[in-house]
Amino acid sequence: MLDTNDILETIQMISDENLDVRTVTMGISLLDCADPDGRKACEKIYRKITTCARDLVKTADEISATYGMPIVNKRISVTPIAMLLASAPDADPVWYAQTLDAAAKAVGVNFIGGYSALVHKGFSAGDKRLIESIPQALAQTEYVCSSVNIGSTKTGINMDAVKMMGPVIRQAAELTKDNMCMGAAKLVVFCNAPEDNPFMAGAFHGVGEPDCVIHVGVSGPGAVRAALAKLPKDASLDQVAELIKRTAFKITRMGQLVGNLASQRLGVPFGIVDLSLAPTPAPGDSVANILEEIGLESCGGCGTTATLALLNDAVKKGGVMASNHVGGLSGAFIPVSEDDGMIKAVERGSLSIEKLEAMTAVCSVGIDMVVVPGETSAAVLSALIADEAAIGMVNTKTTAVRVIPAIGKKSGDVLDFGGLLGYAPILDISSFRPDVFVNRGGRIPAPLQALKN
């Protein structure tokens, strides 16, 4: 149980240290909206989303006002749309994206995720059509987010899908080049994608989920950094890990409370708390700053991967004691543009894309909100996806790529998205050509550790 001091400390985290509930996300199954007539399917989709989520924003705002806990985003995730396209072979996939966008606007959420395809072992009906439509869909919508799962530990990596995604990312950036290449910023390519992730842009509602469910994503890098700042510099790493665990426990309890309240008031099941440390561009609210507080001169230097591994593990251990249902991604996010400390590390030259890739072996996601030169080829983007997927596949963890080719810009320039997405210096990326490897296609076989039965 929390005592009075714990409660007061949590209040201070909210008021002074950027602690918030990053998102309350409603997952909605659209399996019952499938129809051979695409227009009828879209009507069903709009009706179901606007019915299920009509009170989502109002309820979250009421909880926030009553308990004094900031809830930054209200979001929706839906069944991967490629599954619905399978039953409507003549439908234009972009109709579905436009319907999701209209429904999101109608209920007032910040984003809606699920313009997605799961192709980790191959393509089924609707998958290729959806993937090919992603650039147009993201260019023609404001709130829609897209994801594609191209690999898993159990199945290996679908390199035919990886080959497709490089050109899709480039085209998504090109079609939105007048809007900071925002199309690519709303597109994630996964290995081992979780079905209950409340965070965008990678959220979708998995087929094993309830018909409607509430997930919560918490934040709190600023609170962890502030707690560590009070430790003496000669405190052992055991003491560092213990303090992170205790702080993560308090943060997760707040998320658990919000999830329970939202579930009760909306009359839908509570799903999971995703206890990821999600940074913002606000100074101090940074995963990079936590690593520096542990003892690094700058994030990206030697010791970065080790300190990130300690942080990620301690966050998970503290969080799982605070909630019976922890899921999603859960750990530490390292998005470059959304983390003030990461941005500064890139600017001072200590953080490169190669070091970021090494860090993804121990963080909770992957190459996230990384901006590369606009001339970066589609094959290089596909090869970067393959590298990240290999890390996830071999280590039985989720990895992802959300990379933005900054059309018309070069290394050293800056792309400024504004808001929570922040800004990012454009990172160098190797231009040595991987075309022969990417064009081979086929599948990278599942690793030996997949054989667990």
Image: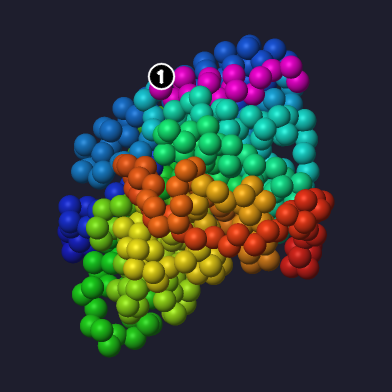
Residue 386: x percent and y percent?
67, 57
Secondary structure, magenta segment, majority class:
helix
Which residue position is annotated with label 1?
A: 106
Q: Is residue 124 above or below residue 159?
A: above
Which quadrant is home to the N terminus?
bottom left
- Residue nearest the viewer, comparing 404 with 333: 404
Residue plotted at (55% across, 48% down): 375
The magenta stretch spans residue 193: no
Residue plotted at (41% across, 34% down): 179
- Residue nearest the viewer, comparing 33 with 268: 33
- Residue nearest the viewer, comparing 310 with 64: 310
Q: Amino acid at mark 1?
A: Ala
Q: Is residue 40 visible?
A: yes
Q: Is residue 143 left or right of residue 254?
A: right
Q: Is residue 217 above or below residue 232?
A: above
Q: Secondary structure at mark 1?
A: helix
Dividing the picture into quadrants, the one containing residue 116 is top right
Dividing the picture into quadrants, the one containing residue 95 is top right
Residue plotted at (50% across, 69% down): 355
Residue 406: x percent and y percent?
47, 46
Q: Which residues are magenta?
A: 89-106
Residue 36: x percent and y percent?
73, 15
Residue 23: x percent and y percent?
38, 42
The way the protein has been coloured in the rendering is rainbow
Q: Is residue 240 above or below residue 434?
A: below
Which quadrant is home to the C terminus?
bottom right
Q: Is residue 412 above or below residue 169?
A: below
- Residue nearest the viewer, comparing 233 with 267: 233
